[in-house]
Image (cartoon, rainbow, N blue to C red):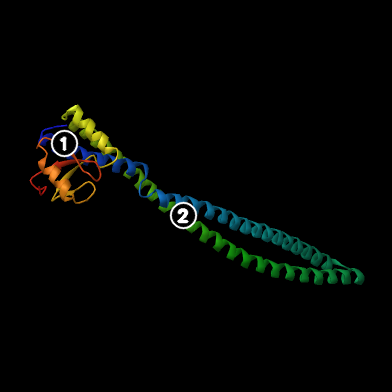
């Protein structure tokens, strides 16, 4: 196959655009933030589970504290009633019974207050644990939101570059003869498609051509379409090819 050197050089533009297209497609489907976002999603699920457990412990302690406070209120009410009855008692036996009950109520209140203090201390620890977990979850959510926004912007940018490169490629391809474009497309299925031969080196595969291969390229006509013997891309020759 033959094609004017200028058309063959145009293949380099096509190859460059195809590289942009491949890179943009990859960037659009695999934004750099994606792996970290997936990690954060898994981390958020684990943090949420732990937060639920800690909230359960805290809520149980609140309920327990509420029961104790209710019991204290009952004891206080009974003490107040017994004290009123004791003040009005005329029977020594009744007075003795009320005094004994008041002693028992005082012990009961002391026990309840000790239990109340213990639960309050445990509740304070549980509240701190919940707050700690909420802070961790908030940090993960904040990072996830930031990275998701960055990924969305990156996808939009990659999409714009992909669309522009697609339009540019169509414009370049329209300038090339069908047979040359077909040869390039076939070569691009397994290689860079087209690459510069620079100082006896194929820029597509970075391999230095052997003496025999170089001689074959030297002997080829200027408009002959020659392929790299290593990677099969179309070799574009210039004054810098070292022939």
Residue 89 at x, y percent in the picture: 87, 67
Between 17 and 161, which is closer to the camera in this rendering? 17
The residue sitting at 22% across, 51% down in the picture is 207
Q: Which residue is mark 2?
A: 138
Report whether residue 178 is seen. yes
Q: Is residue 122 above or below residue 165?
A: below
Q: Which residue is mark 1?
A: 225
Label 2 element class:
helix
Name the quadrant containing residue 28. Answer: top left
Instruction: Tell how many labels.
Output: 2
Report whether residue 155 is seen. no
Q: Is residue 130 left or right of residue 66?
A: left
Q: Gap between marks 1 and 2, in whole Å?
A: 61 Å
The residue sitting at 17% across, 42% down in the picture is 235
Residue 161 at x, y percent in the picture: 26, 39
Circle 2 packing at 10 Å, graded few (<14), some (14-19), many (20+), is some
Q: Is residue 106 left or right of residue 153?
A: right
N-term mark: 1 or 2: 2
Q: Is residue 3 left or right of residue 53?
A: left
**Numbered label attached to residue 48:** none
Label 1 element class:
loop
Q: Looking at the figure, which quarter contains the N terminus?
A: top left
Circle 1 packing at 10 Å, graded few (<14), some (14-19), many (20+), is many
Residue 238 at x, y percent in the picture: 10, 44
Residue 147 at x, y percent in the picture: 38, 50
Between 76 and 149, which is closer to the camera in this rendering? 149
């Amino acid at each position: 196959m033959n094609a004017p050197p200028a058309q063959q050089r145009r293949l380099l533009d096509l190859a460059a655009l195809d590289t942009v297209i491949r890179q943009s497609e990859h960037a659009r489907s695999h934004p750099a933030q994606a792996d970290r976002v997936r990690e954060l999603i898994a981390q958020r699920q684990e943090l949420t589970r732990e937060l639920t457990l800690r909230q359960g412990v805290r809520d149980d302690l609140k309920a327990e504290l509420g029961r104790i406070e209710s019991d204290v209120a009952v004891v206080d009410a009974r003490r107040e009633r017994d004290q009123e009855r004791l003040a009005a008692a005329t029977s020594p036996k009744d007075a003795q019974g009320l005094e004994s009950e008041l002693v028992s109520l005082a012990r009961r209140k002391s026990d309840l207050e000790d239990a109340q203090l213990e639960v309050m201390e445990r509740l304070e620890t549980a509240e701190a644990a919940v707050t700690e977990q909420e802070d961790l979850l908030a940090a993960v959510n904040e990072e996830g939101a930031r990275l998701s926004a960055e990924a969305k912007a990156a996808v939009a940018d990659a999409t714009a570059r992909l669309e522009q490169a697609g339009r540019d490629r169509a414009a370049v391809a329209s300038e090339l003869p069908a047979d040359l474009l077909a040869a390039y497309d076939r070569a691009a299925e397994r290689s860079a498609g087209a690459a510069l031969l620079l100082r006896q080196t194929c820029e597509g595969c970075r391999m230095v051509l052997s003496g025999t291969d170089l001689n074959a390229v030297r002997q080829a006509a200027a408009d002959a379409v020659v392929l790299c013997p290593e990677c099969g891309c179309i070799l574009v020759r210039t004054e810098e090819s070292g022939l």
